[in-house]
Image (spheres, rainbow, N blue to C red):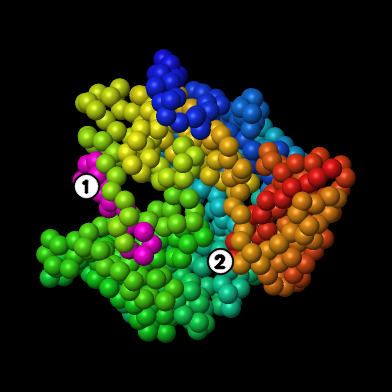
Amino acid sequence: MKNLLLLLALCAMSSILPAQIQLEHTYDKGFLKRIRMDVSGEKYVLKQVFCHLSLFSADHAPFAEITLTSGFNGCNDVFFSEHLLDADDDFEVLFNWLDDGPGLDVGASVWNNGLEQEISSSGYMPVVSEIAGGQTKLLVSSAVFALPGPVPEHYYGSLNRLERMVFPVDGERYVTYNWKYFDGFHFHNSDHALVKSVDLPLPDFEYLDEVSQQYFNDDTPYEFFGTRYQGPDSNGNDALVEVVREDGITLFSEPCDYASINKLPGLPDRLLVYGYSAPGVKRQKIFDAPSLTLLHDFPFYTERVSPDGVSGYYVRSTVLKDTLWMYNDNFQPEKTIVPMTGSNWNFGFSRNLFSGSGKLELFFTTQSGPGLNDTKVLCIDEDGALLYAFPGATAAHIDRQPGMDDKFFVTYPDSIQVYDFLNQSTGAVEVSAARGIKAVPNPFGSEFDLILPESSDYTIRLLNAAGQVVHSQRIVGDMRATIQAGDAMPPGIYFCSVTDARGRHTIRLIKYE
């Protein structure tokens, strides 16, 4: 029925615009996500009750079925791989579970070749930690495992929180702190030897738990960012957002209700500080995050979004979100959008995906009555023109992942639909020349030279259009390498993924005959 309703909506608009999306597949009710496996490439994973997992290939053909049995609730977060635990190409699953015992304990297990192995009886989702030039590790609560394996390597003790980080000066560090009996932040080297502990005499210092080095300034001491709750001031602000250096010097302090650093790919980081300038008077200050320079002060709350990965916008809305005001990155008002009457939520933003017009696009969930069947998802452009309607849908989102085409997921009470955006060139993130990463020649034949911004350690992966890894190699202490693609690779579109300590970047390549 919902397919018929959507078809009628599309037909009604056929004289206005050509179709820009196409229904690919409808999945049963459950939790659906899209992943990219190490070897076999793009997959869809549908998790249903009792942690029954169904895997599907990129064309939605059935791939595998498994049921995870550990714990009362089976599994919560699930991570798939193919080469992390052993050398074969069979897929592996890392997951955490909730036990039904008196303490509702959380644990973690791995599934491999049909067998489940518990690796922690008290821990949260296993985190696969990859750093350039270093060995891949598995972190489960305060335990470190070497991979492949997992092989137990080190245990930092109960009630400890653990992160593995790479700092620009100190390099690899394991950062721990005791979340219940706080006694400071502890920094350990790659051999797990304690290098330094920092415990400043500040109330609620443990809430400054975002640790960096040379992010806010160029010196080498560690920087601690977060909000410390101090109780309401005369204006009604409950907290202080602060940046404090490990020697106790305060680099930044601002009264707030709450604050966050907004990081959008390809755009400068911004520190958003929400608070009150007077009792009951809301305000939001925008700071450049690294320099902590005040850029603007809005007399209301906004959200920062990037519809296309190129431009940033600040969005203000009414309580019901039936009207939106959008301000550009220079803080100038640019658009007023009136979606429709009623209560609206789950807003998403895009450009040139649903209409091909170059205009901003907005999709959201709206409810026209009290019943669950009164919800629908609408997509409009910046002028309020209706592009698509999904009657009965409860939510929608765009799934964007480097090296794969964008997809549109629409959720109904009994199913999930996956749509493809027509006429999109690629879902990969193009790297600009300013990043200094180039492939020469492009298009290429049997090989190409990869030119990198500086001599360093890099992991290079070449992927085909389905997201499958067709070639990989390491570059150690160099800024140039020849990638031998070989004549056996068919012509077409490929993606070269470059990973170093600063992150992962992808460029699009074309191979000719």
Q: In which quarter of the image is residue 454?
A: bottom right
Residue at the spot 40% in from the left edge and 33% down from the top edge: 387
Whether residue 271 appears in magenta in the rendering, the answer is no
Of the pair 155 and 491, the residue shown nearer to us = 491
Residue at the spot 55% in from the left edge and 40% down from the top edge: 406
Which region shows up in magenta? 316-331
Secondary structure at badge 2 equals strand
Image quadrant holding the C terminus, namely top right
Q: Can residue 158 be seen in this view?
A: no
C-alpha distance separating marks 2 and 1 = 40 Å
Residue at the spot 78% in from the left edge and 46% down from the top edge: 511
Whether residue 327 appears in magenta in the rendering, the answer is yes
Of the pair 504 and 510, the residue shown nearer to us = 510
Residue wearing tag 2: 165
Q: How crowded is mark 2: few (under 14 residues within 10 Å), some or many (20 or more)?
A: some
Residue at the spot 59% in from the left edge and 45% down from the top edge: 427
Secondary structure at badge 1 equals loop
- Compared with residue 107, is residue 283 higher up or lower down, i.e. above or below? below
Q: In which quarter of the image is residue 209?
A: bottom left
Residue 186, percent from left and from top: 49, 72
Q: What residue type is labelled 1?
A: Thr
Disc number lying in front (2 or 1) = 1
Q: Can residue 449 be seen in this view?
A: yes
Report if the CB atoms under discs 2 and 1 are less than 8 Å apart: no
Q: What residue type is labelled 2?
A: Met
Numbered tag placed on residue 318 in the rendering: 1
Residue 229, percent from left and from top: 26, 66
Image quadrant holding the N terminus, namely top left
Of the pair 379 and 479, the residue shown nearer to us = 379
- Compared with residue 165, is residue 139 higher up or lower down, i.e. above or below? above
